[in-house]
Image (cartoon, rainbow, N blue to C red):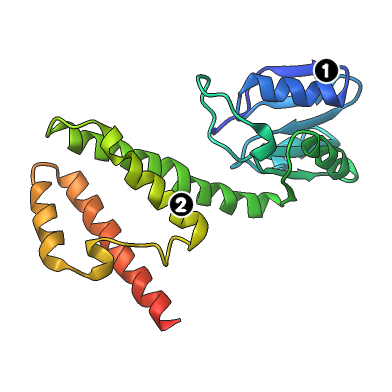
Amino acid sequence: EGHIAVHVLKLLSLAGLIRQLLLSKEPSLAVRDGNADDVAHTAGSLDMGMLKEHFCNCGVLYPMQTFSKAKALDYSQIPFFVEATGEGVLTLENLAQSVSDTVYRLSSEQRRYLHLASVFACNFTNHLFAVSEEVLGNIGLPLSVMHPLIAETIDKVYTIGPVRGQTGPAVREDCNIMNAQMQLLSSNAELQEMYKLISQNIINYKHKNTND
């Protein structure tokens, strides 16, 4: 998501623009209304200023979701974040509201933090699932044995929040278990260090929220 796609869609209407944008499944696509010099990009991490250098009327239409070509999505459930010059924000807002139930106005600076938060919530979490799958593979088990655990973890995020829902040896500060598990990772220094850092961060969060 570090670039704007080279191709630009020239469309006859705003309705056509949004439909083509969503059908493209390209998370950092530049889009243009064919009847005007109105341009918007859809990247979460890029500043609107990069378009302002070249276009008078420009904006950002960011659908915050993870996109995979093999997986269909319900766009009404995806939050959209918009930013634009002048009255263009109303155009993008109406455009987003035509497909999504949740639309926010957000500046480029705010969107950088939003994208950072999404990297923690999505990309890093997905990587940890991959690590879990690798560990399970070493003892001949599939990742599916973790599905109920993953589902309950996510459900608690929705219902009681991640801080209150935190469990495990780190939040209990059970050094015996943590040391034993780090020993299991002795052949992989990188994972061992990651385990140590995340565990310490969980402990720090616990103390921070206790003190607050």
Q: Nearer the viewer, residue 135 or 151?
A: 151
Residue denoted by label 1: 11
Q: Is residue 178 left or right of residue 106?
A: left
Tag on residue 25? Answer: none
Relative to 131, residue 12 above or below: above
Name the image quarter holding the N terminus: top right
Q: Is residue 21 left or right of residue 93?
A: left
Mark 1 or mark 2: whose residue is earlier in sequence: 1
Across and down, in percent, residue 140 comes to 14, 30
Q: Residues within 10 Å of mark 2 (few under 14, many from 20)?
A: some
Residue denoted by label 2: 155
Across and down, in percent, residue 35 comes to 91, 21
Residue at the image position 22 percent from the left and 34 percent from the top: 134
Across and down, in percent, residue 180 comes to 9, 57
| CA separation in Å, label 1 and label 2 | 41 Å
Residue type at mark 2?
Answer: Asp
Give the quarter of the image for residue 60.
top right
Relative to 102, residue 58 above or below: above
SS label for mark 1: strand
SS label for mark 2: helix
Camera-near label (1 vs 2) is 2
